[in-house]
Image: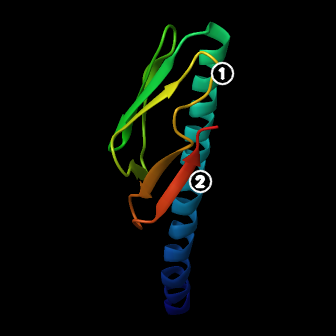
Amino acid sequence: MTIMGLALSLVLPLSQRSLERAQSQVELSRLSQLLKNASRRAFVEGATVVVLGEDARLLLEGSSASGSYELAHHRLAAPVVLRFDRWGMPDEAALRLVNARTGADVQVNTR
């Protein structure tokens, strides 16, 4: 029993870190997909789509683009207003995020 307890105390923190890392990557992937969808929507509708972000919340505004997205593992490094023009092109190339747990900088490509 003691050996099993020791083994679990060694393995459990490693598996938790792996799970957190995987969840962080999934969140970044979803955020990237959200930005690509905003770009496509702006192009298809021929209208500007705006992404407003502060701290851990992103809001989408546009003709039919609306909604919000809450980040669980990251925070925006600074408040952001990202506009996708009617051609689907963003006015900034990347969003700068900070990992909430480690403080590491992460960039998400908007193009």
Please give left or right for residue 43 compared with residue 21 in the image: right
Residue occupying the far bottom of the picture: 3
Crowd tier of the residue under label 1, counting other residues whose Cα lies within 10 Å: few below 14, some 14–19, many 20 or above: some
Residue at 37 percent across and 52 percent down: it is: 77
Label 1 and label 2: CA atoms lie apart by 23 Å
55 w.r.t. 91: above or below: below
| Horizontal and vertical percent position of residue 53 | 37, 35
Please give left or right for residue 50 compared with residue 46 in the image: left
| Horizontal and vertical percent position of residue 91 | 52, 32
Disc number placed over residue 25 in the picture, else none? 2
Query: For the residue marked with disc 2, what is the amino acid?
Result: Gln
40 w.r.t. 56: above or below: above
Please tell me in which quadrant of the rendered image residue 34 appears. top right
Query: For the residue marked with disc 1, what is the amino acid?
Result: Arg
Residue in the foreground of this view, choosing between 49 and 23: 49
Q: Mark 1 points at which residue?
A: 40
Residue in the foreground of this view, choosing between 89 and 39: 89
Which dot, 1 or 2, sits closer to the camera? 1
Q: Tell me if label 1 and label 2 are in contact, CB under 8 Å.
A: no
| Horizontal and vertical percent position of residue 70 | 41, 37
94 w.r.t. 14: above or below: above
Q: How many labels does the image show?
A: 2
Q: Earlier in the sequence, mark 1 or mark 2?
A: 2
Residue at 59 percent across and 17 percent down: it is: 42
Residue in the foreground of this view, choosing between 62 and 86: 86
